[in-house]
Amino acid sequence: MLRSSTETEALGEALGRGLRAGDVVLLYGELGAGKTTFARGLARGAGFRGRVASPTFALAHAYRGRRLTVHHLDLYRLEGRVDAELGLEEILADPRGIAVVEWPGPARRWPARRVEVRLYHARAGRRAVVRDRRRTA
Ligand SMILES: Nc1ncnc2c1ncn2[C@@H]1O[C@H](COP(=O)(O)OP(=O)(O)OP(=O)(O)O)[C@@H](O)[C@H]1O
Ligand SMILES: [Mg+2]
């Protein structure tokens, strides 16, 4: 149970610390479930020190840390469509990049080796279910 946004961020940070180049993290959850908050912690854990804001309108932000670049995507506006302008192929091919994706959509073909995070509204905050498919896929 995540009782505050600080705890959501801390869980993201813990995951972020263990990420390696090439990793993909898909964030599922309805509006306001805490996806951006989680991504902010994840970017911190991956070594980024700057500001992390929702990329709802930009679609993608790149946070360059010393070790990794965190590509933070929010595909809500695309409604599952593929958008060439997004440059998704390049993002996924970035040799020092990791991708964290809000609203990944049902149809898109993400790599099978990925981490799935599901965030749910709960009575006292949020609930998270993390499924690491980097090895089992
Ligand atoms: N565990 C928590 N308990 C209570 N509030 C939380 C928790 N985690 C995050 N929040 C708060 O929920 C609100 C929405 O968070 P956030 O913007 O991260 O959600 P989101 O899933 O990215 O939303 P969107 O679907 O609009 O992209 C923020 O005010 C955030 O601080
Ligand atoms: Mg968001």
Image (tube, rainbow, N blue to C red):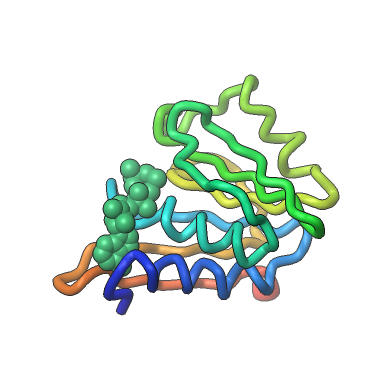
Q: Residue lying farthest bottom?
A: 1
Q: Give percent across and percent down for residue 51.
A: 55, 47
Rendered view: 127 above or below 74: below
**Res 33 seen here:** no
Quarter of the figure with residue 134: bottom right
Q: Residue at x 64, y 50 (%)?
A: 99
| Residue 30 as seen in the image, left or right of residue 100 | left
- Residue 43 coordinates in the image, percent (x, y): 60, 57
Percent x, y of residue 17: 66, 72
Q: Of 137 and 15, which appears nearest the observer?
A: 15
Q: Residue furthest front?
A: 50
Residue 66 appears in the figure: yes
Query: How far across and how far down the image is residue 12, in percent?
Result: 51, 67
Q: Quadrant of residue 109?
A: top right
Relative to 125, residue 104 above or below: above
Relative horizontal placement of residue 3, taking residue 114 as reference (left or right): left
Q: Residue at x 30, y 79 (%)?
A: 1
